[in-house]
Image (spheres, rainbow, N blue to C red):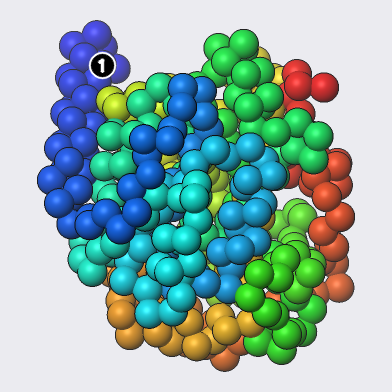
Amino acid sequence: MGKAGALIEALRWRRRRQMRLARAWRKRRELAALADRTDAIRKGDVLAFLVLRNEAQRLPHLLAHYRALGVAHFLVVDNDSTDASRDLLVDQADVSVWHTRASYRAARFGVDWVQALLMRHGDGHWCLTVDADELLVYPHHDTRPLPALTAWLESEGERSFGALMLDLYPRGPLDAAPFGPGQDPLEVLCWYDSANYTIQQKPESGALWIQGGPRARAFFADAPHKGPTLTKVPLVKWSWRYAYVNSTHTLLPHALNRIYATDGGEKLSGVLLHTKFLPGIGARSAEEKTRRQHFGAPGAFDAYYDALTAAPDLWHPHASRYRGWRQLEAEGLMSRGGWA
């Protein structure tokens, strides 16, 4: 591509980013504050942003996990939960809560709502954007909290931090194991696939594209290219000019997607332990199929939802049992890079 072509391409992506930001700013009107405690946010605080619906069972452990990692404040959009999620969140002193009945799908699967909050409250902060079923772990997370991680990243000139979303599953049918509110999901979801992954670089965005794991193996074996994208960039030193493009998989500007080394070495990275497959996944999948809020062409994934509704057994003899970040590093699923 010549200089003129490169300039045109850069301007096109800049315009796309501006449109994302403008759209999110309009979508902020769909959010009604239930508990706005953002005046408690202080300079240097690590912030967490979430959009959720009906996550009362996960929330106590989720909040405890991220508090232990050093998150100072949570900014949460509740998409019209019908369980106790909203009341639970409003009762937390370190949580600000917004409510909306608007369409999750029409808000770019919640990205517009998070984007609006990031623009308003995230500028200048390290911001962690996750789903309610994602638990971030990284090398030394048990002894070095997020402020230590972000300080090291800044010292290295980094503004973003990448993670592999790792699907966890139980041994036996997905709905068989008992699970109670506030319980650690890792007591039930003990297993994962350690090897069946593909990775490539997306030329247009510079982002990594990782696919594989149990969902690709069990539900997309005949069309692996339709399997879920497992690369995420959940932690970013935010600027109001930044924009998530596709969930937390890719960002603009494109430089934020370079979460990998280009010199033959390795960069520090983490893993998002994905706790989607807790008991109740069958009923939840049936509801998601009916609501049709989670995919751009929802009907194309009816077979996937039907398979999940049946709560299958994803375990296999070569599954790895989760034993902590050191095992994930040894298997090549995360890296310490230069953060020894």
At horizontal 66% and vertical 18% (from top left) the residue drawn is: 152
Q: Find disc 1 in the rendering and name its residue.
A: 6
In front: 270, or 298?
Answer: 270
Residue 172 in the image: above or below residue 81: below
Residue 219 sits in quarter: bottom right
The residue at the point 63 percent across, 27 percent down is 147
Q: Is residue 273 above or below residue 299?
A: above
Query: Along the line of sight, which residue is nearer the eye, 170 or 100?
Result: 100
Whole-percent x and y of residue 101?
Answer: 23, 69
Spot occupied by residue 94 in the image (x, y as percentages of width and height): 50, 47
Q: Is residue 332 left or right of residue 273?
A: right
Q: Taking the image as drawn, is residue 228 in sight?
A: no
User: Splitting the image into 4 quarters, where does residue 169 fall?
Assistant: bottom right
Residue 224 in picture, x, y percent from top left = 53, 63
Q: In the depicted view, which residue is nearer to us: 198 or 49?
A: 49
Q: Is residue 74 above or below residue 6?
A: below
Q: Residue at x 46, y 75 (%)?
A: 84
* Left or right, 50 with reference to 174: left
Q: Secondary structure at mark 1?
A: helix
Relative depth, front residue between 101 and 3:
101
Assess disc 1: are there few (<14), some (14-19) or many (≥20) residues with their C-alpha within 10 Å of its C-alpha.
few
